[in-house]
Amino acid sequence: MSDNEKTYDLCIVGAGFSGLVLAIKLARAGLNVCLAELNRVVGRRILSTGNGRCNFTNSRMGSEYYYSDYPLDFIGDNHEELEDFLRDIGVINRALDGYYYPITNQAKTVREALENEVNALGIDVFLDNRVKDILKGDVFTVVTHRMEIKAKRVCVASGGLSAATLGSSKFGYKMATKYGMTVTRLAPALVGTVSSDINLKELSGVRALGKVTYKFHSCQGEIQFNKDGVSGYPVMCISRFIGLDELNKSLGSLEIDFVDFLNEEELKNELKKRFAHNEDATILSSLNGIANEKVIELIVSLSRIYGDTRVSKLDEEDIDNLVYNFKHFIVSLKGTKGFDNSQVTAGGVDLAGIDLDTMESKSTKGLYFIGEVLDVDGICGGYNLTWAYTSAAKAANAIIREV
Ligand SMILES: Cc1cc2nc3c(=O)[nH]c(=O)nc-3n(C[C@H](O)[C@H](O)[C@H](O)COP(=O)(O)OP(=O)(O)OC[C@H]3O[C@@H](n4cnc5c(N)ncnc54)[C@H](O)[C@@H]3O)c2cc1C
């Protein structure tokens, strides 16, 4: 056990994005804070964000980009503050179509900037310390596998269950339950899907634009097909519902609209126009450009038409079949690719037990929860790091006010 006799104003469990932001804000305000982290480096997960580029926020911001059972009107109010915060520690950014990245295009820049600031402020960081328990007496005792840390307050910033190799644990959920809060069902989100649908063999390697619908949830963008599943932005954005249904054993299928820029009637007219333009053309050449080439081949075959059929031979029913198959392509599902391949966790510590002005537990004074451990998940696009920042900033402001 450690001979660390200090009693910190706050001990933060987890030196990920939210924990680092909170530590910096409080240390700047003169508070005595420390971080306990199971990895040997702070902010390890940040390195993997945005495909190694760290998409940390988005100019399109608001609660509609998040899933939560509670009104989160305040979300993103401070996303410009997040840009300023990072700018202040040396991260110059640039926005690509509203998606913010460091100008270096390297997530490493963000991790190192946070680490440098933590060092500059002299914040105590206990690396390679897996926190096992939080005990409450006159002050809190944070028990790691190496030491005990005394603190007047504790903030759980231990993240979710995604990408275990980057450092994830059930710790935050265990502590929430221990201190009288509830934890909602946990499912992988922002994750690809698994399917053994026979049609995927034909589409393996294809990236096609379209709209993906799963039950009542739809999203548009680039869909990526593999022989054993479907992923890409629109699938990732709705994958949380697939993950939750997998738990409930109520999995549905994906429906893909490959021609989402035209409604059914417009598509029918477009096909008729093309077919009338050159009646001697084959169906495949006549459809050229309406969708990805391999998609066209598959849809024609699913509509029971040979690729070399002259369009003059097609009747009204053939055209209706083509329209239907382009707009309602079904992929049966086996589930998601699981937590290890997911970017975020759907579900978490129920916000009913948290004061959303302060991020403090309603049942235990001095115990705070921030970041992904809470039951909030955003879609792809910098929304999850924005939530990590927003919740950390709320906790920081509240603690500074109190102290
Ligand atoms: C591959 C990938 C790409 C992503 N890309 C983006 C993106 O581009 N934009 C975006 O907004 N979001 C992205 N995310 C999501 C984003 O990284 C997370 O939502 C965000 O990091 C959550 O911050 P956090 O501080 O709550 O948790 P984390 O960053 O996960 O930090 C939690 C920390 O707690 C530590 N910890 C856990 N348990 C313990 C314990 N018992 N004791 C001590 N320490 C512990 C962990 O090691 C970790 O360092 C991505 C995620 C992944 C996996």
Image (cartoon, helix red, strand yellow):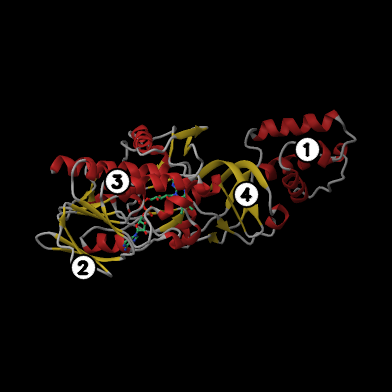
Q: Pointer 3: what residue?
A: 120
Question: How much space separates mark 4 and mark 2, taking CA atoms?
Answer: 50 Å
Question: How much space separates mark 1 and mark 3, taking CA atoms?
Answer: 62 Å
Query: In the rendered structure, which disc, 1 or 2, sits on the residue that comes first in sequence?
Result: 2
Question: How much space separates mark 2 and mark 3, taking CA atoms?
Answer: 24 Å
**Could you tell me which secondary element the residue under label 4 belongs to?**
strand
Q: Pointer 1: what residue?
A: 287
Asked whether the viewer can see residue 161, the reply is yes
**Could you tell me which secondary element the residue under label 2 belongs to?**
loop
Nearest the camera: 56 or 348? 56
Nearest the camera: 13 or 226? 13
Q: Nearer the viewer, mark 3 or mark 4?
A: 3
Q: Which mark is residue 224?
A: 4
Give the answer, above or below, for where 103 lies relative to 194.
above
Query: In the rendered structure, which disc, 2 or 3, sits on the residue that comes first in sequence?
Result: 2
Residue 225: % across, % down? 64, 52
Residue at the spot 44% in from the left edge and 59% down from the top edge:
166
Residue at the spot 22% in from the left edge and 51% down from the top edge:
33
> Which residue type does callout 3 highlight?
Ala
Question: How much space separates mark 3 and mark 4, taking CA atoms?
Answer: 44 Å
Q: Is residue 308 left or right of residue 40?
A: right
- Are there few (<14), some (14-19), or many (20+) residues within 10 Å of tag 3? few
Q: Pointer 2: what residue?
A: 2
Nearest the camera: 223 or 384? 384
Question: How much space separates mark 4 and mark 1, taking CA atoms?
Answer: 21 Å
**Could you tell me which secondary element the residue under label 1 belongs to?**
helix
Query: In the rendered structure, which disc, 4 or 2, sits on the residue that comes first in sequence?
Result: 2
Residue 259: % across, % down? 66, 38
**Could you tell me which secondary element the residue under label 3 belongs to?**
helix
Residue contact between numbered discs 4 and 1, judged by CB atoms under 8 Å: no
